[in-house]
Image (cartoon, helix red, strand yellow):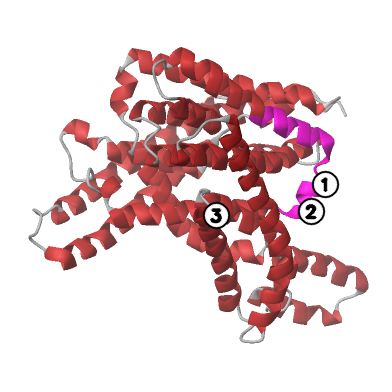
Amino acid sequence: MNNFRWQTRLISRSFVLLNLIVIGIVLALAAAIALPDGENGAHGTQAAIFLWIAIILLVAKFSSLIERLGQPAVLGELLAGIMLGNLSMLGLHMFTPLARDPIIIFLAELGVVILLFQIGLESNIKTLRAVGWRAFLVACVGVVAPFILGTYLVGPWLLPGLSNYSYLFLGAALTATSVGITARVFRDLGKLDLPEAQIVLGAAVIDDVIGLIILAVVSAIVTVGAISIGAVSVIAGKAILFLVGSIVAGQLLAPRLGRLFSRIHTGTGMKLTLAISFGLIFAWLASVIGLAPIVGAFAAGLVLDPVHFRFFKGPPLVEELEALTTGADHQQHRAIQQLLASHRHHHINELIEPLGNFMVPIFFIVTGMGVKLETLFNLPILLTALGVTAAAFAGKIVSGLAAGRVRRALVGWGMVPRGEVGLIFASLGRSLGVVTDDIFSIIVIMVVITTVCTPVILTWLLRRQPSAA
């Protein structure tokens, strides 16, 4: 135990020290480019953007050291953004223009589209069909309960005097579930085969779909400026029809497009181009009909399946290893083929991952820079954040009651972490002008607390007693 504490303390101190070193380097670079307006002209401004992007990526990668403490990299990126965005409290204002730069904002928005496309790719239509009624009920309760708590109870009670649109976005931000955090805990402890784990993983897929429909409805309501039952019904119908239509059209078009483009070239470059173009076109279509582009990106990822790219070459390593299996016996050949099939199945995800590694951290750094630390010194806001966080916990934990005869607490806690999706909802609300700085900071605090606490509590629950099913 003492050795574990010593290692944790050492890692923590190393993390702080490295961040201080990075801050020093970043400040030196920033000072070198923080020239008065007009001195360098347009060329100097564009050149500075290259350096800003490099700084963002370096800070994001250094902050990923937080993974050694058992926390997801997204949390480190968010905290790094908060740190950079609040250096003005120390009289250092060189980063202030960064979060408002149109190029950086565009890259951040593109990053979130790529992220939702990746989330969609990790799900698929077969998974949606196979989740079972228990996972479906858990997902429904896990979306409806926190949405009602945030929109109609906690929001008006703790934040009186705001518009209904603000409460709607607060409720929407509470609906999200970041399954990656929960899945890692189950995997690390070798518990992914538990019925509770399967329910949570299945429910999280449905949770994403329902949550994005709610987001589409809420954002469209804000844009249109109508909140009547008729208007809400029309917008909800539009969102559902878009998702269903995307799935149907995508299932029909994707195989044909794959066959068509494979006649031009079967390499990984064409494969990546087709996948990314598919995601961006769907994002554009969603925007055209008045929905958030991320809804279209998620739908595109949900539609695409490895079978649609069967006419293209697989990963080079898979192709080479496949050629070496000709002399293997039947058992070895079968085992190798299963392994190669797994890599071939995830090839699209692996192709897009480097692009995500470049674009997505920009979004989380910029998101963190939008948090005002002054709110933490405002006792009413801090207490409100704790109240909203309590509602966030309660709204998801209660979903475990719909899981049937399993360890309901384990299922409920597995649905708690908000992670990246909650931040996406908050950022969209802020861009629409209905999420204030205070609400934005409150949501970020909620995301941080649920993300940090859940792995600890889940680990304790998993080690406490065996599964009930």
Mark 3 lies on a secondary structure that is helix
Q: Residue at x 44, y 28 (%)?
A: 166
Residue of label 1:
130
Please name the residue that numbered disc 3 is placed on. Answer: 286
Q: Residue 291 — which label?
A: none
The magenta stretch is 124-143
Count up the numbered dots.
3
Vertical position of residue 43 compared to residue 448: above or below: below
Q: Which residue is drawn at 34% across and 33% down?
A: 371
Q: Nearer the viewer, mark 1 or mark 3?
A: 3
Nearer-N-terminus badge (3/2): 2
- 41 relative to 69 in the view: left or right: left
Q: Can residue 449 be seen in this view?
A: yes
The local secondary structure at tag 1 comes to: helix
Compare residues 175 and 53 and report the one nearer the observer.
175
Relative image position of residue 35 (x, y in whole percent): 10, 54
If the image is split into quadrants, where does the N terminus sit?
top right
Residue 131: image location, x then y, percent = 80, 43
Name the outermost residue toward the right: 330
Can the viewer see residue 66 in this picture?
no
Q: What residue type is labelled 2?
A: Lys
Q: Give coordinates of residue 81: x percent, y percent.
A: 35, 41
Q: Mark 2 points at which residue?
A: 126
- Tell whether label 3 touches label 1 (CB within 8 Å): no
Q: What element carries label 2?
A: helix
Inter-mark Cα distance, 1 to 2: 6 Å
CA gap, disc 1 and disc 3: 27 Å
The amino acid beneath tag 3 is: Ala
- Residue 437, relative to residue 67: is it above or below? above
Quadrant of the rendered image containing residue 450: top right
Residue 135 painted magenta:
yes
